[in-house]
Amino acid sequence: MTNAQIIFNNSLSLMEQGILKGSGIMATVEDENGEKKQIELPETIHTYAAWKSIGYQVKKGQKAKAAFTIWKYTESKKQNDEEEAAGRMFMKLSHFFTADQVEKIA
């Protein structure tokens, strides 16, 4: 499962629990049985690093709305110029914030 799928599935679950709000955007999804249904998409959530990469800063004192594991990729350092860097993926607990918890970086 990709990070996008993990985040989407967890966002839907968090919205059902009342932790996240709906975005007002409707989408058609297909379940395992091939049945299609209309659902409201949850509000956007990102990690601290993802918000920072798009020009936002988490407001001081804000606590993450959710925490769940996603894939993280790391590259090991090259031993010498002839060697290729090897990478690995592992699951890491990440914390997620909503748009109302961030502010534009000045």
Image (cartoon, rainbow, N blue to C red):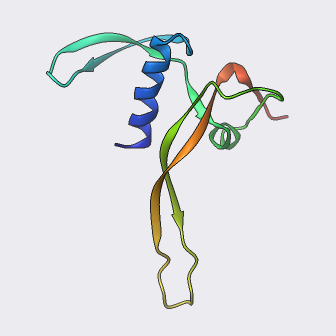
Quadrant holding the N terminus: top left
**Left or right of 39 on screen, residue 22:** right
Instruction: Give how far across and how far down residue 13 sits, in percent.
Output: 43, 20
Q: Which of 10 and 84 is in front in this view?
A: 10
Q: Residue at x 45, y 27 (%)?
A: 10
Q: Residue at x 49, y 91 (%)?
A: 82
Instruction: Give how far across and how far down residue 80 sits, in percent.
Output: 56, 90
Query: Relative to residue 26, is residue 67 depicted above or below?
Result: below
Quadrant holding the C terminus: top right
Query: Relative to residue 91, is residue 95 depicted above or below?
Result: above
Residue 16 falls in image quadrant? top left
Residue 81 falls in image quadrant? bottom right
**Left or right of 52 on screen, residue 13:** left
How many dots with numbers?
0
Q: Residue at x 23, y 21 (%)?
A: 30
Residue most extreme to the left = 33
**Left or right of 33 on screen, residue 23:** right
**Left or right of 103 on screen, residue 84:** left
Instruction: Give how far across and how far down residue 3 sits, in percent.
Output: 44, 41
Q: Nearer the viewer, residue 77 or 36?
A: 77
Residue 67 falls in image quadrant? top right
